[in-house]
């Protein structure tokens, strides 16, 4: 019996009973401008490391399916072989377009986004769940205001210096002429901050939250159009010769997966005699959107999907991930949980237990990497192993068949807006 991540016991892997020979995995990233090949490289590194730690093998090969960027994986675990075709459902181009705004537009976004969360009261209600994600949301505001203060101070210093030099050299204060170099200095300082934002991530995070708040929680039209393409890819997987179709939604990709699957089940695009259907949500930030006034569709989709027998839905977060709403049941905290709620199963990745003390200490303040740890290897994995889930011989339903949600699961319905569409 292996301990799971909440300190309970797990029967998994005492005996490997195969119910998946082939799996289709469709991964939905969060708000991330990086190309899909970066996810392949992360998977390659993590699979190699996890296989070495856990004593199994995973081989990776070229993509065999038509569609977005992907790869093939073949595993052998305890002598049992299985394979998977993994595909990244790409929307990084939409992310890049939304991030193409200039400096002034970003500060305007900051004002609009702050008002969306503060004016609606969502910010204060989110703080009642987890302070970490709220602090992460305030981080870009603080840094952008700090950058503006430094830039203005530098500009004022230059303008004053020019005026002082004019007085000394020609006896005439050049206050007006000092405005031009002063303004140029402000622009230069802000430009330098933006140029090196890869170290600070203030612009990136600001544009992330602005994207979600832009329509008060409703999806932008371009994202809804892309979701239609994603549905076609999922339907193609569900009608292929495979044993399980696993949708993985990371970060904001989790609520996109909810939108996608709820629509597909409503529209009859999930056949009862087809492959097993599963949703694995990782590091979800659903409340950041579902708590906004116009997120009616998302709230309706959460409520609808939480009762469906057509799928298995497992939600994995970790209190050590300051960017996720760790152990918050996204349906319940949004205030739309029906009496017959079945999903999601909420479990913890428990970084303090599943990472070695040395690794946990080294990573503790690397907040961005901790948000991606769900896709990486663990030194002491419990019942969550991303690579066995995506490429191993056990379906998500079977792996967690006897699992209970974490005792620390948060279900308090603190959302003010509960209307649905």
Image (cartoon, rainbow, N blue to C red):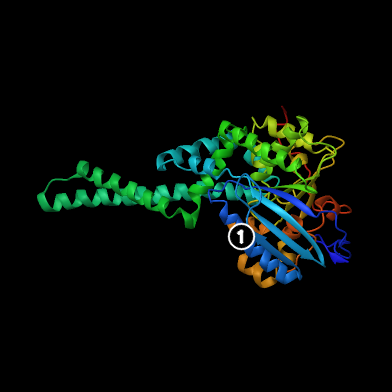
Q: Is residue 225 above or below residue 103?
A: above
**Residue 313 % position (x, y):** 79, 45
Determine if residue 277 is in view. Answer: yes
Between 191 and 49, the residue placed more toward the observer is 49
Between 245 and 241, the residue placed more toward the observer is 241
Q: Which residue is at a point 59% across and 36% down the rendered structure image? A: 223
Image side of residue 222 versus residue 122, left or right? left
Image side of residue 286 versus residue 142, left or right? right
Image side of residue 8 versus residue 256, left or right? right
- In the picture of the structure, the residue carrying the numbered disc 1 is 42
**Residue 176 % position (x, y):** 21, 41
Quarter of the view holding residue 59:
bottom right
Q: Is residue 126 above or below residue 49?
A: above
**Residue 73 % position (x, y):** 69, 58
Quarter of the view holding residue 348:
bottom right
Q: Which residue is at a point 75% across and 29% down the rendered structure image? A: 267
Where's the C terminus, which quadrant?
top right
As drawn, the residue found furthest toward the left would be 170
**Residue 351 % position (x, y):** 71, 62
Q: Is residue 215 above or below residue 246?
A: above
Between 249 and 183, the residue placed more toward the observer is 249
Between 92 and 185, the residue placed more toward the observer is 92
Q: Decide: few, some or many residues near mark 1? Use Cα within 10 Å; few <14, some 14-19, many ≥20.
A: some
Determine if residue 367 is in view. Answer: no
Image side of residue 337 versus residue 292, left or right? right
Quarter of the view holding residue 91:
top right
Where's the N terminus, which quadrant?
bottom right
- Callout 1: SS: helix
Q: Which residue is at a point 29% across and 46% down the rendered structure image? A: 184
């Amino acid at each position: 019996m292996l301990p799971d991540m909440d300190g309970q016991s797990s029967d998994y892997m005492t005996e490997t009973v195969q119910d998946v020979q082939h799996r289709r995995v469709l991964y939905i990233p969060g708000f991330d401008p990086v190309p899909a090949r970066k996810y392949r490289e992360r998977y390659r590194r993590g699979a190699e490391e996890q296989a070495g730690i856990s004593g199994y093998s995973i081989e990776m090969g070229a993509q065999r399916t038509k569609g977005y960027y992907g790869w093939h994986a073949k595993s052998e675990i305890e002598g049992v072989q299985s394979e998977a075709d993994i595909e990244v459902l790409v929307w990084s181009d939409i992310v890049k377009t939304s991030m193409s705004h200039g400096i002034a537009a970003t500060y305007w976004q900051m004002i609009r986004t702050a008002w969306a969360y503060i004016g609606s009261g969502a910010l204060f209600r989110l703080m009642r769940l987890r302070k970490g994600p709220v602090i992460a949301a305030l981080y870009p505001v603080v840094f952008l205001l700090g950058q503006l203060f430094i830039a203005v101070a530098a500009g004022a210093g230059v303008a004053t210096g020019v005026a002082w030099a004019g007085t000394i050299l020609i006896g005439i204060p050049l206050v007006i002429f000092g405005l031009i170099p002063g303004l140029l200095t402000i622009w230069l300082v802000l430009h330098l901050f933006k140029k090196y934002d890869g170290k600070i991530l203030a612009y990136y995070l600001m544009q992330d939250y602005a994207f979600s708040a832009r329509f008060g929680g409703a999806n932008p039209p371009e994202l809804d159009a892309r979701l239609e393409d994603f549905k076609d890819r999922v339907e193609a997987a569900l009608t292929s010769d495979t044993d399980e179709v696993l949708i993985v939604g990371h970060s904001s990709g989790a609520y996109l997966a909810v939108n996608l699957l709820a629509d597909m089940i409503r529209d009859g695009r999930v056949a009862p005699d087809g492959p097993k259907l599963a949703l694995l949500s990782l590091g979800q930030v659903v409340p950041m959107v579902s708590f906004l006034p116009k997120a009616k569709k998302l709230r309706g989709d959460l409520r609808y999907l939480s009762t469906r027998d057509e799928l298995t839905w497992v939600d994995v977060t970790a209190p050590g991930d300051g960017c996720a709403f760790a152990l918050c049941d996204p349906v319940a905290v949004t205030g739309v949980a029906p009496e017959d709620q079945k999903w999601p199963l909420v479990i913890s990745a428990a970084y303090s237990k599943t990472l070695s003390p040395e690794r946990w200490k080294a990573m503790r303040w690397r907040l961005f990497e901790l948000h991606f740890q769900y896709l990486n290897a663990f030194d002491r994995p419990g019942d969550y192993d991303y690579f066995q889930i995506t490429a191993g011989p056990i379906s998500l339903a079977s792996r967690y068949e006897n699992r209970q949600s974490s005792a620390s699961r948060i279900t308090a319905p603190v959302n003010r807006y509960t209307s649905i569409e």
